[in-house]
Image (cartoon, rainbow, N blue to C red):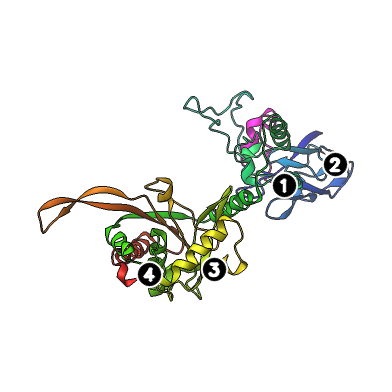
């Protein structure tokens, strides 16, 4: 008679662990090869672990509700010499290899294999570059058990909050021990309360980053815009010129501001453009409705009123949400280039950098002349737009910015 280990199988390509839901048989009960004996739950589905051979359940080493890594021993089956193992688990592997911690990351073979050369348990993957902030073989909080997620939910934490926690479990999973150690270290750190706005911004950016984003850029000459502004009353700001130019460009082809929903592009019903306003510990985005239908001069008062309300954090409900794109003037901070992130419900965000005097060649006069130039960036959802379409949209915005009388 011999004992055959019951191993947690590889239940999916990216599954590193599973949570035991129920033991389907009892210790001392006779089972057949391939019989369901343990019900487990992964991040994707509920599945069963089967007996590796015919025999009697010697013992279970697991508890319902706890999570176990792929390759961990869940129990043992006592089999007789005539009971040949007939599963996809590792019965033919050397028994000392089953105890090796490196085995946790080995995908169970689909058929019996020849004995493998045993590696000492102390062997570890080591980074080839010294001084890395996180060891190269640690992937952070990539896989988390239902128990871990429940504990995080209880504490109001998100997966992104654990991005810097190096998991010590199989496949880089963060174990409950890793998590509790992280919490202990956190208690010894100086903490300040994040504002509700900061938490909301963090949540929005996390959701935005779930899409493939890209950015294109192009310089724009501000001299025609500034000349037009000096002759206007009231005087629009540079961001309002950019907002109106974007609105007109999008009205010419609304698909560029559409959202990908399944296999369809949802076109915007209205060209409603938001603009970023810095507030205490965050950013608010007031919205100008139907910006393609309002001439530039008629929007100045509305724009200024919305800025004032935003800074006081008293925006009315009709002036927030449901915008299709955003303007951000990061040039007010002295920045010449940035890659802003579109809001989760948007496909586009247009950025305007700080103006700089540069020499520009005048072909007619054959001399260099100073001009005021700023960089414009267009960040976009790459699922909806490609580089060419984004480049053409940005060029159209540029052309409108340099012909302000059309706005």
The reply to whether callout 1 and callout 4 are in contact (CB within 8 Å) is no
> Would residue 201 be counted in the magenta stretch?
no
Q: Where residue 351 appears, x then y in whole percent? A: 41, 55
- Name which of mark 1 and mark 4 comes first in the sequence: 1
Q: Which residue is mark 3?
A: 261
Q: Is residue 249 visible?
A: yes
Q: Secondary structure at mark 1?
A: loop
- Name which of mark 2 and mark 4 comes first in the sequence: 2
Label 4: how many Cα within 10 Å (few below 14, some 14–19, many 20+): many
Q: Is residue 84 visible?
A: no
Q: Nearer the viewer, residue 301 or 250?
A: 301
* Mark number, residue 156: 1
Q: Which residues are magenta?
A: 87-109
Above or below — where is 20 with respect to 324?
above
Q: Nearer the viewer, mark 2 or mark 3?
A: 3
The reply to whether callout 3 and callout 1 are in contact (CB within 8 Å) is no
- Name which of mark 3 and mark 1 comes first in the sequence: 1
* Mark number, residue 56: 2
- Name the residue: 40% across, 45% down: 334
Label 2: how many Cα within 10 Å (few below 14, some 14–19, many 20+): many
- Name which of mark 4 and mark 3 comes first in the sequence: 4
- Name the residue: 64% across, 41% down: 162
Q: Which residue is mark 4?
A: 249
Q: Where the N terminus falls, by quadrant?
A: top right
Q: CA distance from mark 3 to mark 1?
A: 30 Å
- Name the residue: 58% across, 47% down: 281
Q: CA distance from mark 1 to mark 4?
A: 42 Å
Q: Nearer the viewer, mark 2 or mark 4?
A: 4
Above or below — where is 269 with respect to 329?
below
Q: CA distance from mark 4 to mark 3?
A: 23 Å
Q: Secondary structure at mark 2?
A: strand
């Amino acid at each position: 008679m011999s004992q055959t280990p019951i191993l947690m199988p590889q239940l999916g390509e990216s599954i590193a662990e599973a949570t035991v839901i129920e033991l389907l048989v009892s210790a001392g009960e006779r089972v057949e090869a391939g019989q369901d004996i343990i019900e487990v739950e992964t991040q994707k589905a509920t599945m069963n672990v089967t007996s590796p051979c015919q025999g009697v359940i010697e013992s279970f080493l697991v508890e319902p509700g706890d999570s176990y890594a792929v390759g961990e021993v869940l129990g043992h089956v006592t089999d007789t010499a005539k009971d040949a193992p007939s599963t996809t688990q590792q019965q033919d592997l050397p028994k000392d290899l089953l105890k090796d911690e490196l085995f946790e990351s080995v995908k169970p073979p689909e058929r019996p294999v020849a004995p493998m050369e045993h590696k000492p348990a102390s062997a570890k993957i080591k980074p080839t570059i010294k001084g890395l902030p996180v060891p190269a073989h640690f992937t952070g909080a990539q896989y988390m058990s239902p128990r871990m997620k429940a504990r995080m939910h209880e504490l109001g934490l998100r997966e992104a909050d654990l991005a810097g926690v190096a998991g010590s479990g199989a496949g880089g999973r963060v174990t409950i021990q890793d998590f509790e150690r992280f919490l202990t270290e956190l208690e010894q750190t100086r903490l300040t309360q994040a504002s509700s706005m900061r938490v909301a911004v963090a949540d929005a950016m996390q959701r935005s980053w779930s899409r493939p984003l890209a950015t294109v850029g192009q310089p724009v000459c501000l001299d025609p815009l500034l000349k037009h502004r000096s002759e206007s009353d009231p005087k629009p700001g540079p961001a309002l010129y950019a907002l109106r130019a974007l609105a007109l460009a999008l009205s010419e082809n609304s698909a560029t501001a559409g959202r990908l929903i399944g296999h369809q592009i949802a076109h915007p019903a209205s060209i409603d453009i938001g603009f970023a306003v810095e507030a205490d510990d965050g950013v608010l985005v007031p919205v100008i409705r139907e910006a393609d239908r309002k001439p530039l001069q008629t929007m100045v008062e509305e724009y200024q009123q919305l800025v004032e309300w935003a800074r006081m954090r008293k925006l009315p409900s009709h002036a927030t949400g449901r915008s299709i794109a955003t303007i951000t003037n990061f040039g007010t901070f002295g920045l010449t280039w940035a890659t802003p992130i579109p809001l989760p419900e948007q496909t586009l965000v247009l950025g305007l950098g700080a103006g700089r005097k540069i020499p520009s060649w005048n072909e007619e006069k054959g001399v260099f002349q100073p001009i005021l130039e700023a960089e414009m960036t267009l960040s976009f959802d790459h699922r909806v737009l490609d580089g060419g379409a984004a480049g053409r949209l940005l060029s159209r915005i540029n052309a409108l910015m340099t012909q302000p009388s059309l706005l």
